[in-house]
């Protein structure tokens, strides 16, 4: 059939799933790879956006969550738990509903976008706001999963990485080979780990002739990997990547070094500028954290670190509707008109 079946069915032969095991899916994956005209012009490269906000709950987390929740279901788990800056909790909550499980989420108080909180609430998750940051939440979630009968579905769960690696497969399947450079935001560092694993597997099996250089970008106030030290009080407007001690730190460094890539930082100002450019000039509305990769790509092109003529894929990780405050802030207030064509035409400058 032509219907996309979700990442487990589409890539079953490349995922650790037992025949006959339950598959909990919302049809995730199969997301658009969109050629970015303005970014291509600005960089002299062939730039594509992997639009992960098109996933069922609006972020790339769904790829890993179908695997983690299916596994938990197969193991007979009745409850799952995660720490989250918002997207993981939204995804876990939705997939837990599909699986008939209870979902508990731990989020940093006051630091998750409203859309994500709304998702966790409407899917019926049990939400605890923790008086601390994401790193504190993850520590707490790990402790609870050790002591109580609840399965941890953060990306420290290897099933999550397995599911997320399918995004790299899709890129190669769409382009016919791996790109020269793959760019993405880095928070807890699971996704850069997963992409690198996916690219490495396709290269090892000869599906791709090469592997890309991995370019990760952290927000300047939450850049522990770049700075080489834990950030105790991470700060950034990009709440999704407000993380000071990434769980997959080591494997992110491995992906960077083995690929000949970089992990660098971008300022919140650069993130917001890229966020606006994506929406206003490429027609792609992402959440602020998702623009960090684009911000990094543009900075690299400007200061000569990106040679022209390369094929570049940038993952934009989450949907702009998750956190619309930044779209509205600073934008002019729409004018109000009467139900009158001439008045509307005048306001629109039509004549
Ligand atoms: N972009 C978005 C929109 C995210 O939600 C995240 C992570 C990242 C990028 C970074 O990915 O952690 O694999 O390096 N969000 C997690 C969460 C932490 O709880 O939703 P990463």
Image (cartoon, helix red, strand yellow):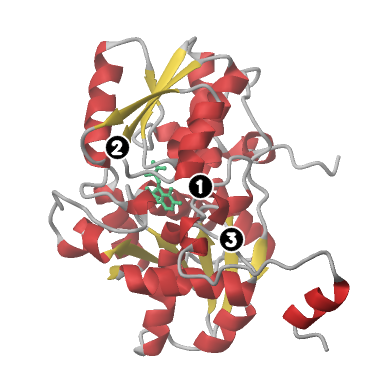
Which is nearer the N-term, disc 3 or disc 1?
3
- Of badges 3 and 1, nearer the viewer stands 3
Instruction: Note whether 230 is above or below 94 in the view shown.
Output: below
Instruction: Note whether 76 is above or below 294 in the view shown.
Output: above
- Of badges 2 and 1, nearer the viewer stands 2
Q: Looking at this view, is 177 or 264 the one in front?
A: 264
Cα–Cα span, label 2 and label 3: 30 Å
Residue 326 position within the rendered picture, expressed as x and y whole percent measured from the top left:
46, 61
Image quarter (top left, top right, bottom left or bottom right) of the C terminus: bottom right
- Of badges 2 and 3, nearer the viewer stands 2
Q: Residues within 10 Å of mark 2 (few under 14, many from 20)?
A: some
Q: Looking at this view, is 129 or 42 the one in front?
A: 129
* Residue 351 left/right relative to 180: right
Do the residues bearing badges 2 and 1 touch, measured as CB atoms within 8 Å? no
Q: Which residue position is annotated with label 2?
A: 109
Cα–Cα span, label 2 and label 1: 30 Å
Task: Give the residue at x 44% y 60%.
Answer: 288
* Residue 74 left/right relative to 305: right
Cα–Cα span, label 3 and label 1: 13 Å
Q: Secondary structure at mark 1?
A: loop
Q: Can you tell me whether the CB of the residue at mark 3 lies under 8 Å from the nearest atom of ligand 1?
A: no
Q: Which mark is residue 165?
A: 1
Q: Residues within 10 Å of mark 3 (few under 14, many from 20)?
A: many
Q: Which mark is residue 50?
A: 3
Image quarter (top left, top right, bottom left or bottom right) of the N terminus: top right
């Amino acid at each position: 059939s032509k219907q996309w079946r979700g990442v487990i069915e589409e890539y079953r032969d490349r995922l650790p799933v037992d025949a006959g095991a339950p598959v909990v899916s919302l049809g995730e994956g199969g997301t658009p790879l969109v050629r970015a005209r303005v970014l291509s012009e600005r960089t002299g490269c062939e730039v594509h956006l992997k639009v992960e906000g098109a996933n069922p709950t609006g972020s790339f987390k769904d790829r890993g969550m179908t695997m983690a929740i299916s596994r938990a279901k197969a193991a007979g788990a009745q409850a799952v738990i995660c720490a989250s800056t918002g997207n993981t909790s939204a995804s876990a909550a939705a997939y837990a509903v599909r699986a008939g499980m209870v979902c508990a989420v731990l989020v940093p108080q006051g630091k998750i976008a409203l859309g994500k909180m709304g998702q966790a609430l409407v899917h019926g998750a049990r939400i605890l706001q923790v008086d601390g940051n994401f790193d504190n939440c993850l520590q707490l979630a790990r402790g609870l999963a050790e002591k109580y009968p609840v399965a941890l579905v953060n990306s420290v769960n290897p099933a999550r990485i397995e599911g997320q690696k399918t995004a790299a497969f899709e890129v190669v399947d769409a382009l016919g080979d791996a790109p020269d450079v793959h760019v993405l935001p880095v928070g807890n560092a699971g996704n850069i780990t997963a992409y690198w694993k996916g690219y490495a597997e396709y290269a090892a099996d000869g599906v791709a002739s090469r592997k890309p250089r991995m370019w990760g970008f952290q927000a300047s106030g939450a850049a522990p990997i770049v700075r080489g030290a834990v950030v105790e009080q991470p700060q950034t407007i990009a709440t999704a990547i407000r993380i000071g001690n990434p769980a997959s730190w080591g494997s992110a460094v491995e992906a960077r070094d083995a690929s000949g890539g970089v992990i660098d930082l971008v300022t919140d100002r650069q993130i917001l500028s890229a966020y606006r450019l994506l929406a206003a000039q490429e027609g792609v509305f992402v959440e602020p954290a998702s623009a960090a990769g684009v911000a990094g790509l543009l900075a690299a092109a400007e200061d000569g670190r990106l040679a022209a003529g390369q094929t570049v894929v940038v993952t934009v990780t989450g949907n702009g509707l998750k956190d619309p405050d930044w779209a509205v802030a600073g934008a002019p207030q729409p004018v109000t008109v009467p139900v009158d064509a001439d008045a509307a035409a005048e306001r629109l400058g039509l004549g």
